[in-house]
Image (cartoon, grey):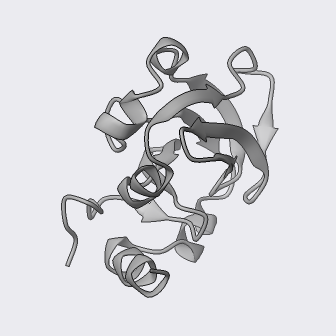
Amino acid sequence: MATDDQPANLKFAPTHEWVRLDGEIATIGISHFAQEELGDVVFLDLPWDDAGERAFQAGSHFGDVESVKATSELFAPVSGALVSVNEALRDQPELVNRSPYGDGWMLTLRVSDPAELDKLMDADAYAAFTNESH
């Protein structure tokens, strides 16, 4: 059963990124669980100026999130061409903490292989995964 922590319309990677697919566009961010584990997010290193110029393979590194506790790498949960990066996060990285599934999204990709979504966890599987990893 999906909860507010894991919305039912998302897919999750074991590295704690989420994906919401709208047509061929995938919006990507980090999960509520991940932002809680990180603590206060203070900086994001994202491909700010690369929209329209870069593509990522599923599992490839697309950025870093720095918090008061640690710096963690971010990985693309699906393959695709970079469409946009959430510019609001440049000046307000705390949006990742306040709204990880809303205003705290990180980037959008034009998905090149929709079948990759089938390899990701649904909300229930992710909830079980995060409970087991604690």
- In the image, 111 versus 48, the foreground residue is 48
> How far across and how far down the image is residue 20, in percent?
42, 50
From the viewer's perspective, is residue 56 above or below residue 52?
below
Q: Horizontal placement of 96 versus 60: left or right?
A: left
Residue at the far front in the pictured view:
69
Residue 6, placed above or below residue 36: below
Q: Residue at x 37, y 29 (%)?
A: 95
Q: Position of residue 35 (x, y in %)?
A: 43, 49
Question: Is residue 43 left or right of 31 when viewed as pictured?
Answer: right
- Give the camera-side residue of 23 and 88: 88
Q: Residue at x 46, y 57 (%)?
A: 37
**Seen in the image, is 58 located left or right of residue 23?**
right
Residue at 48 percent across and 65 percent down: it is 12
Quadrant location of the C terminus in the rendered image: bottom left
Say which quarter of the image contains residue 122.
Answer: bottom left
- Quarter of the image with the N terminus is bottom left
